[in-house]
Amino acid sequence: MKRQWYRSVFLMVVGIVFSLVPILTYGQSAPEDSLMEMKRSQYLLLDRGLQYRITKSINSMYNFDFETAERDFQVIAYQYPNHPLPDFLMALSYWWRIEVDITNESYDDIFLAYIDRANEKAEALFDEDPTNKEAAFFLAAGYGFEGRLKAERKSWTGAAWAGKNALKYMELSRGEEEFNPELLLGDALFNYFSVWIPDNYPLLKPVMALFPKGNKDLGLEQLEQVATNAFYTRIEAMYFLFRLYASQEKKPYEALRISSYLHEKFPNNPYFHRSYARHLYTVGRWSEAVEESGEILKRIETGMTGYESNSGRYAAFYMAQYYERIGNRDEAKYYYLKTLSYGEESESQESGYYLHSLVQLGQIALEENQKALAKDYFKKVKKYAKRKHPAHQAARDFIKKNKL
């Protein structure tokens, strides 16, 4: 819950940078052209051929075919060596590696190195021409992603500095009619979170008073518009929509609708895959949830790109719940133990699935008259769960009731 709070707070501050994807379609019509003479008509956003090329590459990236995507990005780097676009694309590719398991810091350095290089090149463009909206877009996105990662790592000073720069350049990038459908994503996120945060965390109201007033309902409407009408930011809008529908708006069928589409379009994206399995589980489509969960576990075992312990924790838990539901205790126990194993591998012992698995294993141990084992499970719950967590209360109740 605390991690979700960190993410939600920072999404409001720099979430606007998720209008980054239209940036991916910019470039220079000729590297040797004078930057001071670059006009709006020369933005490669309007070049349909480049749009098609980069869209194919980005789709490969979303589908976790990083080898194909990055090979294409390297071609763009050869064509535009002084432009921020290639480095930004590479950074985005590493961001999706991070997104699958946000606690994994192994990609941080290379991600930040590409972001820094992209920012440096964008700043050079902006220094030569302060009216260059392309450069402003890159700087807004680059600083925004830098800030988001630093917020995840709880580097709040660095996150605040990057977020401030992201918002500054976002404002400077406005004004081109053709960009508006893509820019709407940033407005949507700001409208939603600038209301949601003070409603859910009253202590932050003084901070939020420094920002313009938002409109949460309008934010959702705008996200739906982007998801329906935008070309480049459509997938990012869908990503945020299914998360909001699942967690904040309590509309699980809407979350399932979107995650189903994303999994179908990008079947090898582990984040979309496990989200689809989760939403199937949430709405009670058990057989389908088990089928998808089994596939996730199989892909982890075969070492498929991006499928790791974090996804395994989700999938194993859904399998365990299914087998417990149909009365197959042995299989339920097997998958609850796998949930624990994946949770420990990803250092997610405070997660709900891990804690609930401990409670269920303790209960199964009691049913099998293994009181010492049950006590061990319940003691682990008390070790990792906050006292107010339902799992902590359940463990205390079982210990007291069974005199463990």
Image (cartoon, grey):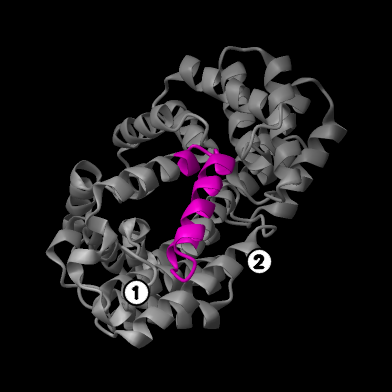
Q: Residue at x 20, y 74 (%)?
A: 213
- For label 1, the crowd category at 10 Å Cα-Cα, with few meaning under 14, some 14 to 19 and many 20 or more, is many
Is any part of residue 392 visible from this angle? yes
Q: Which residues are magenta?
A: 60-86
Q: Does 365 sit above or below residue 239?
A: above
Query: Does 48 lie within the magenta span?
Result: no
Q: Earlier in the sequence, mark 2 or mark 1?
A: 2
- For label 2, the crowd category at 10 Å Cα-Cα, with few meaning under 14, some 14 to 19 and many 20 or more, is few
Dividing the image into 4 quarters, which one contains the C terminus?
top right
Residue 109 — which label?
Answer: 2
Which kind of residue does numbered mark 1 sit on?
Ala
Q: Residue at x 21, y 46 (%)?
A: 224
Q: Give the quadrant of residue 179.
A: bottom left
Which percent across, then down, holds residue 44? 28, 59
Residue 391 — which label?
Answer: none
Which percent across, then down, holds residue 138? 38, 69
Which kind of residue does numbered mark 2 sit on?
Asp
Q: Give the quadrant of residue 24.
A: bottom left
Q: Residue at x 43, y 31 (%)?
A: 263
